[in-house]
Image (cartoon, rainbow, N blue to C red):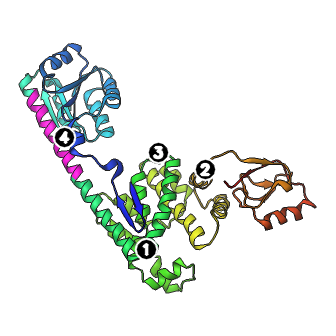
Amino acid sequence: MVNVEGSKATVSNGNHEKSLSEAASTLKRILMVDDEPNVLQGYKRQLHKNYELVLAHSGEEGLKALEEDGPFAVVVSDQKMPGMDGVTFLAAVRKQYPDIVRMMLSGQADLDETIAAVNEGNIFRFISKPSTPEILSKALDAAIRQYSLMVAEVELLDKTLKGSIQSLVEVLSLANPHAFGRSTRVNKVVKQMAINMDYPLLWELEMATLLSNLGMITVPDKILTKVFMGKILEKDEKEIFSSHPVAGYKLLNEVPRLGTVAKWVKDQSIGFDRAELQAAKGTKLEQIVLGRNILNLGLEFDHLVAIGNLSEAAAVAKIINNSKIGKYNTEVVDALKNVIFPPREPVEVHSLNEIKVFMTTAEAIQDEEGNEIIPEGQLVNQPTIQKLKNLESSIKIKFPIQMWVED
């Protein structure tokens, strides 16, 4: 989360933050998975005094318990189970819940499979069956210590990360208030767009947006002044200014765990590429490409309003038109529309006389043959009304028309 007040900003890690006190209640929570009910009941009798146990009779039931009854510090699974075996189950646990320490109970017959699983990194430790309560308790205590160490490491990294970002934000706010102001404006829009789209990497995207102008600290004030005043840059000035995303990337890429943020900052000027997004579908890269699309459009919208001197409605209308020729991701454009024009019921107008200045078209104004006259998202002004009146004598305008009315 980013909190901005005046010329100062504070940064918190949102979902990345996990304190030791919060994790303390999880330390003794153990999920035991075995297809033999008698074995599970034996674990419960032997271990319930020292640990908080949850029992599951299959891998599928174990995954359900993780989702509904978590969090857990340790998962212990038998290897030989019908359906989903222990190796498969613990691999799924690792993928969905990487912080949980995973252990396996295995008979001699399954030893080769178990050793292979350990070597692949899926399992912290395995215990031969049958096992005594003492051996099992020692193994569980070791797993709990491992979980504690991981939580402590995460907390240390998060504090380091938070401090690093806070320092970078403060440097930007002091070095160039205009660049910082732009970043905070864009962040408000980008965050709402991402929320509108249920975008999963919200924290990283907020950081990339807030730090998108960090590299401007390397650009001379004279050039930045011209940029923010909307003046035309000389060729050499353009080259210097266009280098700021790479400069920002170099600063951020030195900070642990900011790889995605740094890449977005570097690639912030890269526009939408439909083929790239299609190729990334269903892979981890899809969310990276989509995040860049959101950031790029947020920056473009701010440029049109703050430097291009367009109204928000006119900026959205221009973006909508450009999206029709493939310049922008239409899903992201829809999110921007929902942010600038929060969903509400438009009004219907049934004649030209009902169209007033400061209304905004909720759909394109067309003639009876379906030809577009005024695009969707267009803010109506006096010239717009005059244009429609002039056209009315030669063409028939299609009514009713959906319009947004300014609050």
Q: Is residue 144 magenta?
A: yes
Which residues are the magenta region?
Answer: 136-155
Q: As drawn, which residue projects farthest toward the right?
A: 393
Which of discs 4 and 3 lies nearer the camera? The answer is 4
Quick check: marks 3 and 2 in contact, CB under 8 Å? no
Provide the residue designation for mark 1: 177
Quick check: marks 2 and 4 in contact, CB under 8 Å? no
Q: Is residue 363 magenta?
A: no
- Which amino acid type corresponds to the residue marked 1 in the rendered image? Pro
Residue 121 can be seen, yes or no: no
Q: Position of residue 80 (x, y in %)?
A: 23, 23
Which of discs 2 and 4 lies nearer the camera? The answer is 2
Q: Position of residue 100 (x, y in %)?
A: 24, 38
Which of discs 3 and 2 lies nearer the camera? The answer is 2
Relative to 246, residue 69 above or below: above
Q: As drawn, which residue projects farthest toward the top?
A: 38
Callout 2 environment at 10 Å: few (<14), some (14 to 19), or many (20+)?
A: few
- Which amino acid type corresponds to the residue marked 2 in the rendered image? Pro
Provide the residue designation for mark 2: 342
Using the rendered view, name the quadrant where residue 99 is placed: top left
- Mark 4 and mark 3: Cα distance apart in space: 31 Å
- Which amino acid type corresponds to the residue marked 3 in the rendered image? Gly
Mark 2 or 1, nearer chain start: 1
Q: Residue at x 48, y 68 (%)?
A: 182
- Mark 2 and mark 1: Cα distance apart in space: 30 Å
Indicate the secondary structure of the residue bearing disc 2.
loop
* Image side of residue 327 versus residue 75, left or right: right
- Mark 3 and mark 1: Cα distance apart in space: 40 Å
Indicate the secondary structure of the residue bearing disc 1.
helix
Q: Position of residue 195 (x, y in %)?
A: 49, 49
